[in-house]
Image (cartoon, rainbow, N blue to C red):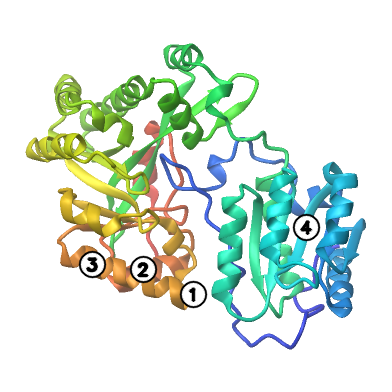
Amino acid sequence: MRPSPTTWKIGEAAPAGRRSPEALPRRDAYGPGSPATVHRRASLTGLEKLRQGRVLVVDGAAPVRAAVASILAELGIADVVAVADATEATRIIDEAAPGIAAILCDLHLPDVDAAAFLRRLAERDFRGGVVLIGAGDQRVLKTAGALADAHALNILGVLPKPVSATEIAAVLERYAEHAGAPDALEPETVDADELRGALRRGEITVAYQPKVALPGGALAGVETLVRWDRPGIGMVPAEAVIAAAEAHGAIDELTDAVLAMALRQDAAWRAAGTPVRIAVNISVACLRRLDLPDRVAAAAADAGAAPADMLLELTESRIMRDIAGPLEVLTRLRLMGIGLAIDDFGIGYSSLAQLRRVPFTEMKIDRAFVSGAAHDDELRAILESSVALGRRLDLVVVAEGVEARDDWDLVVRLGCHQAQGYFVAGPLPGADVIPWAAGWRPPL
């Protein structure tokens, strides 16, 4: 039975034009977080999967518990257990954790607060989905969601009260992106020989996500995203591939291989008469090699590419503690004419310091501040300030995570130079980029 958009409201009636439920961003170190970076696409929807398991509702108010249970029943989820406090919820989890598919939890519980309950879930390695619901200061609700994410819990979303059946259904549908996927690859689960063998066998490949110029929407370049189709496991997210490469001293080989693949594709595009500026992510670990500029220049020369056609993206969230060596490498790259982008701007610890001391040419604003910002005053304020800062510093400002028409319209109005995200296009095989560009029609 499909949910009715108007059945059941928890608390008072919601105002007209209520915003969509907030989704926490999923990170992919070498590319935007998206359903494409999940290990395997689920064949069942999130609700279909949840109907096969048990859902736990934790809320101190009996009317709210009854209302949520009724909404879940209407959504076709029959096995629902509703409890008043974290103590009882913890007991149930200890007895039947594998059978609990998801937990819907209020921020304010009678015995402990939601932060303590989230810690209990993390200590028990709870793998089901988590939805947080709360009234009051919405910044606290968002922070609780970030805490769940920091605990590596499968946070499906955070919902402000009053909440509707439609909103609950929307966040529960995200369960399909979490359930059934193996845990993220830990560096110790793969050795350096396996990683290097994967490179030799062609298991590690790349895809290209388009970036388009604003407001017109013309193709401005592509970001190269690494992928590993690991036998017996499936598609491994880029973040896990990079972590394994860094842990086992194979990051230079991986970077060289990705750069070579991107430059070969660039040569193919140029041969077809359609040059495309390529961007390749560089791990901070690579910057310890003072010969990196020479290696990049040699690879470009071998492929017949001009340095000005290349862009290297540096993830801002990784702190460069020993700045002297990396700064020398980055300076030499810029002297060669190679562009430098500060990636994931805003989520790291030293954004402003990095902008001041590194000769960046491009600022990529993290999707956490773009997706949904049209309906969130705080996100919009951060996004607007970041765009203004980038423009004042004469940087090309790229909005990552443009995943809806509202996102597109906002970044155009705020003056971003380029947009990237699933509203434009997901990662594509190299052969599909030019046909995509020919058929792409930006919104009017």
Q: Earlier in the sequence, mark 1 or mark 4?
A: 4
Q: Amino acid at mark 2?
A: Leu
Q: Which residue has dot 3 on it?
A: 389
Q: Amino acid at mark 1?
A: Asp
In this rendering, would 228 be left or right of 272?
right
Q: Earlier in the sequence, mark 2 or mark 3?
A: 2
Q: Residue furthest left?
A: 335
Q: Nearer the viewer, residue 121 or 301?
A: 121
How far separated are the C-alphas under marks 4 and 2?
32 Å
Q: Which residue has dot 1 on it?
A: 376
Q: Which residue has dot 2 on it?
A: 383
Residue 244 locus on image (x, y percent): 48, 26
Residue 103's label in the rendered image is 4
Q: Earlier in the sequence, mark 2 or mark 1?
A: 1
Q: Is residue 370 visible?
A: no
How far separated are the C-alphas under marks 2 and 1?
10 Å
Foreground disc of the pair 1, 4: 4
Determine contact: label 2, label 3, CB under 8 Å. Answer: no
Determine contact: label 1, label 3, CB under 8 Å. Answer: no
